[in-house]
Structure formats: structure tokens, C-alpha cells
Image: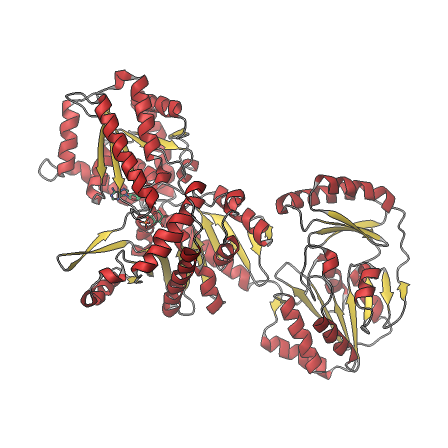
Amino acid sequence: MSKTIILSNRLPLQISIENDKLDVTPSVGGLATGLKSFHKDGDSVWVGWPGLTEEEIPEDLKEDVQKKAKEENCVAVHLTSAEIDGFYYGFSNRTVWPLFHYFMEYTESDEEHWQIYKQVNQKYADKILELYKDGDVIWVHDYQLLLVPNMIREQEPEAVIGFFNHIPFPSYEVFRTLPWRDEVLKGVLGADLIGFHTYDYERHFLSSVSRILRHQVDFNEITLPDRIVKVDSFPMGIDYRKFEQAALDHFEKTSETKSELQRRLDHHLDATPDAKLILSIDRLDYTKGIAHRIRAYEYFLDRNPEYIEKVRLVMLAVPSRSNVPQYRRLKREVDELVGRINGKFSTVNWTPIWYFYRSMPFENLIDLYTTCEIALLTPIRDGMNLVAKEYIATRTDKTGVLILSEMAGAAHEMNEALIINPNNFEQVSEALKTAFHMPKEEQMERNKMLQKRLRRYSVEKWAQDFMKALRTTRENRDAFKSIRITPEISDEILKQFRQAEKRILFIDYDGTLVDFVDKPENAKPDEDLKELIRALNESENTDVVLISGRDKNTLGSWWQDVPVELISEHGVWMRQINGEWELAENVKSEWMDAVRPVIESFVDRTPGTFIEEKNYSLAWHYRKADPELGEIRANELSNTLKELIANRGLSVLEGNKVLEIKSSDVNKGKACTKKLVGENYDFIFAIGDDWTDEYMFRELPETSYTVKVGIKKTSARYYVEGTPRVRTLLEKFNENS
Ligand code: ADP
Ligand code: G6P
């Protein structure tokens, strides 16, 4: 039976050793707590690190670790302390984490860490490949494993792979500073579907892919030579019922069954009935804005002394990544700030901050969520922030006020909270006052909306939606209109080729025989290619026609010494083998003087674009322009030109990063069919990569073998993945001639 394999760096269970025995506790952090519910319900196996280095686990306990993991359908991957240093404390948390959260000053670029990151990603990928069976779905999580999707894809090209990034994806301007940006993007693109919490992260990722790797991006689809990758946003939810039920159970507890913490909290509430508790919970991480929060609280008390003894900040910080210097520094800073502020404002009966630096059992989390009337969550940057959602889910009587940073992914879905900019202390201070005085009815009104949304878009729904989208992406891949040339199909085409008495091959040039380069004049044919075409043309009863949009001078000079028939400018000119150029279509060119200045004005406004002037057409190239600006301007130019040339017998062709204006009477389809008149070819083959080649595919007889290069919408019967595959196919023709 097929299964889902979840892969994340950290397993949802943390193993530690107490008195020579294994102890298992749940992991902290949004990924583990959120995904746990999906894992618990489904038929999945979760692969990850159990939290101890290989050296820390005695030989005789290693098997027990796997056993403990297995009890919860997990598989432990053991990492040595050197791997943890380079991969986890190194590249993951000193490079990717700060960079993706816009802390560029904390971002290190250490080649050794990068090497270890690659090795450990490979180790995880190998573990997945060991467990993988045909039909399984693989779901890779988060920034520690960015290279894994492609590592799996290389070994299992047909696998269904999803990737979800739980942290922000930064803007292109920030991401581009990473020395290994190409490898990182290629790694992630091994997946079929890539998910982010918000549309902003998705947009930033797409923009980086299109600018750095220069892949074509249409809306949220990326076209690779052999696949289409889909990118989408799926805001992660929580296990709503679990938190709601825990809160309901909490209120059923008697004074005997209550936790010690709750008793203390109750004592406080009884002693100061008109005071309010402000809750703050996070991992101790510089992205969470903990130091800012304390300073904003100080600002609030400084300016509003009437709240002294009326509020108390209950601050829970979970130890995290303490081997990374910035985290150690932050710990010192927070200790000092708490000490200073408690010293500054405390009275005999009151301390302004209760500070806990530890992880807490679930029961105590619920005590805090249900008891504190206000939650103050002020991350400077946060992928999602599940604490905000958990707080709202536990407010079963609908009271409570959430103050939330606009920099948290969760803010997009939690508009009814008091949304603040964590750097604006005045605003935070005002929000605290508003929260303190907010009437119960208003609190309930706001929380009603929030709860409704959170209940509906729970973590189960999130996972289901992702899985559904992953399956659809995969089905679309399978149901692609044209058929991939497999070895069997290739054999069949070759058989027809061998048996035919008279054959003709129409072959496009750019994007088909050679890859696109930045400057069109640099795409000259190499010697191997010339040899290949020469040999093909010399085969008996075989005519080869290179058919291109290029101008006749360039095409002619490149193929000067090769006996092959040429068609240039989509069919305006024809050159017989070793012959002279002849005008095949009687077209006009007077229109150019009117159109050229319009295109020139676009060249001026769009850096990186240029005009290519041919004898009977004008082409505007935008391959080197900023991809997004290029697409916008191409659209604009196309519309402008269409108006300008209406009823003049001209048309605008939209090619691969080029717009071409030419006579409507000329196209590759017409040029090809002209070649067939009066001849009885019994094997017709046409291959090309872009829109202009579609005319050939549509107009050639149905029995022709029409082949598109790359995965795109097409009228061709077949497709191949890229230019290397085209050459392999043509070489096979040569072998079979
Ligand atoms: P991040 O993933 O960056 O740590 P989130 O807010 O998304 O931040 O997730 C934090 C998760 O960790 C929540 O599910 C929360 O319940 C849990 N958590 C936070 N603090 C504690 C704590 N002190 N003890 C136990 N669990 C905690
Ligand atoms: C965030 C990350 C997770 C990570 C968690 C805890 O939620 O997105 O990938 O597991 O923090 O961090 P840690 O470094 O302890 O795994």
C-alpha cells in the first residue's frame, strides 16, 4: 500500500537520556506541533533527527531509539556532532535562517558549512530513497532541507514530491546575496509542488526563480525543460479541536486537579482582581522581537504609570539553538532587560515581568493561554506564528485580546486582532491600552470571527489542501496534451523513417538545435551540430530544411559550408542547397518606418531589450530584461502594435522572449506546406520550440511527426525535454538511414 513519507530535520519527538534511560518529550516549534496531527491521523512515516548526536547515544541504546521512534511511526536519522555543527548550527541556522528572516547582518557565508549542509541533505535524501516505493508521496519540510527534493528527483524522476517552507522566503534583493543561490533554487525545484504560508513568500520565490535561473514563470507555474512546477500558498493552521478541547477540560478541573502553575495564577487573580495578565510565548529567537517587546513594555509603563500594578507581562521563552552566538547574546540581553525593568518598576506587591526560560508541558501552556486576558506577540519577522492561533482557539468564552505583529504570516488571516508594527513602540503602547480597556462585547465579536476562520482552516485542512494540490499537479503532468518521446515511441518513429521512400525534416534553430543565449549573435552552430546536419542531409532520400525566424544573412553565413536547405524569416527567403537566396514571399517592408519608433520607445524604457531588424520584419527581444518588467512591457507593446497595424496585413508573433512584427502572409506553416507541393514525401517530421513553430504543427498533414521542444501547450503530437534530446533523436535518424 502506498504511503506518505514526511521528512523534516527535527522529528516531533525529542529523545534525551536520563539515568541511562531514554526519555521522550514532544518537540517545540510550529512545524513539529502543527504537522503532528496530520501524521497521527494518516498513513505516514516521518523521517527526521531525534535531537541527540550520534556520539551522545550509547551503542546499546541506539536500537532503543529506533524502537521509540517506530512506536510513533517515525524513523530516526542519526547525525554526528560534526554534522550538527556544520549543517544545523552552521548553514541552516547561521546562513539560511537569518537571511530568510532579513537579518543580513547575522548571515554567514561559510564554504565548509555549505559542504556539510549538502552532505547532510544527501544523507536525508538517501534515507528517503531507502524507504521509497512506487506510488508513495514524499513531503519535504523546511529550510534545513532545501536540496533534498532535487536529490530525490535525480534518483526517482517519477516520484511525487512536495516541499513546504515554514519560514519566510525573502525578496529577491535579499536572496540574491546568497553565494549558493542557484544550487538552493535548483534543489527546491526538484519538487512538483512548493508551498509557502503566504502569497508574499510565494511571490518572492517566483521572482527569484525567474531572475536567477531565468525559468519561464506563468502566474504560479514554473516551466522546466522536463516538468512544470507549481507554487502556491497554504497558510498553516492548528489542530483547533485539540486546543479547544484542552481549554474546555481545563475549566472542568477542581482545586485538587489543577496544576501548580494554575494555582499560582489563580492566587494572583484573587489578590488583584482588576489587574490583567499579558502573555508572551516564543522560542528564544531574535526573529521573535522579544527584546523589542520588553522595551516597548517599558515605554508603555514609563508613559502610562497608572498601569503600574495593573498589568503583568508573563513571558515564556523556550531555549533554542543555544550554540549559535546570536542566540546566546539574545539570552544575555533578555536576562538583563528583564532584570533592569523589574528593578526599575517593581513595588513591594508587584513585579512587572514574570519570566520563564524553559519548555513547558502542554497542560501549562493551556493554563497560560486560558488565564491571560491579553496576548502580546511581536515578531520582527515570522513565517506564520502558531502561538497566535493557539491563543485564540483556547479562548472558549470568546474573551481575550490578541496583539499581533504585522510581520507574522498569521497577521494576514487574523485581521480582527490588534495588528501592530513591532518597531513602533508608541503603537504597541497604544494597543496595550486599547486591549486593557476593550469591552467584552467587542472582544467576543472579534474572536468569534477569528475562531470561525481558524476552526475551518485547521491543520488537517491545510495538509489535505496541500496533498490535493500535489496530486492534481501530478495528474496534470501525466495528462499533458502531447506525448513524451519514450524509447518505444522513438523506435516506432525510426521504424517509419527507415521504411519511408522519401523523407523530409523541418527543423527549427534557436531553442531546438541550440539553447538560447543572452545575445542572439552568440548562438552559432558548433562543429558537432554542423556535422550532424550534414550527415543527415546526405542520407539517401532525405531532405533537411532548417526553418528559422532569423535573418538570411546570419543564417546563411552560419550554414555557409553545410549543404542544407534554409528558410529564413519564417518563410520570406529560401536557400536551396548550396544555392542562392530567393524571395519566397513577395512581402512589403514600408510599414517598418512607422512601427520602428514605437518599438524604440519601448527599448528606451526597458533596459536590456533591443530591436533586431530583418529584411521584412522587426523583432523586439526582451530576454535580458528584468523578467517581470519584460512581460509587462511585452504585453503593453503587443497591444500598442496590434492597434497600430490593424488592417495592414501585418501580425504580431509572440515568440520565446521576443515579439516579432511581420506580414500576416508569412509563417512557417505556409513555408513548409509550399515545400510539399508536388512532392510525395511519405515521412514528414517537424520539430520546434516556440509559438512560431505551432504554424508548422498545425498546417502539416496529420500523419506528420510533429515534435515540441520543452513542456508547453502545443499542437504537436510529441514532445522532448530539451535541446540535448533533439540532438540524440537526430543522431538516431543518422544511424538508421
Ligand atoms: P516557531 O515555529 O518559530 O517556534 P510558532 O509560534 O509557529 O513558532 O510555533 C511554536 C510552537 O511551539 C507552538 O505550537 C507552541 O505551542 C509551542 N511552544 C511554544 N512555547 C512553548 C513552551 N514553552 N513549551 C512547550 N511548547 C511551546
Ligand atoms: C521553526 C522552524 C522549524 C523548527 C522550529 C524549532 O518552526 O520552521 O523547522 O523545527 O522552528 O527550531 P529547532 O531549531 O529547534 O528545530
Identify the image quadrant of the C terminus: bottom right
Q: Residue at x 73, y 67 (%)?
A: 525
Q: Residue furthest top?
A: 306
Q: Is residue 554 visible?
A: yes
Query: Residue 158 appears at what percent x and percent y?
Result: 49, 67
Residue 101: percent from left, percent from top? 43, 42
Quarter where residue 411 is shown: top left
Answer above or below: position of 181 versus 696. above
Q: Is residue 486 left or right of residue 519?
A: left
Residue for point 47% across, 53% down: 194
Against 703, residue 568 (above or below) is above
Q: Is residue 687 above or below residue 99?
A: below
Q: Nearer the viewer, residue 652 or 704?
A: 652
Say which quarter of the image contains residue 719: bottom right
Foreground residue among 393 and 156: 156
Would you say residue 102 is visible in this rendering? no
Name which quarter of the figure residue 369 lies in. top left
Judge from the rendering whether residue 496 lies leftward or rightward of residue 480; answer left or right: right
- Give how far across and how far down residue 313 sits, in percent: 25, 29
Residue 133, given in percent of the width and then of the height, sits at 40, 70
Quarter occupied by the N terminus:
bottom left
Q: Is residue 110 above or below residue 687?
A: above
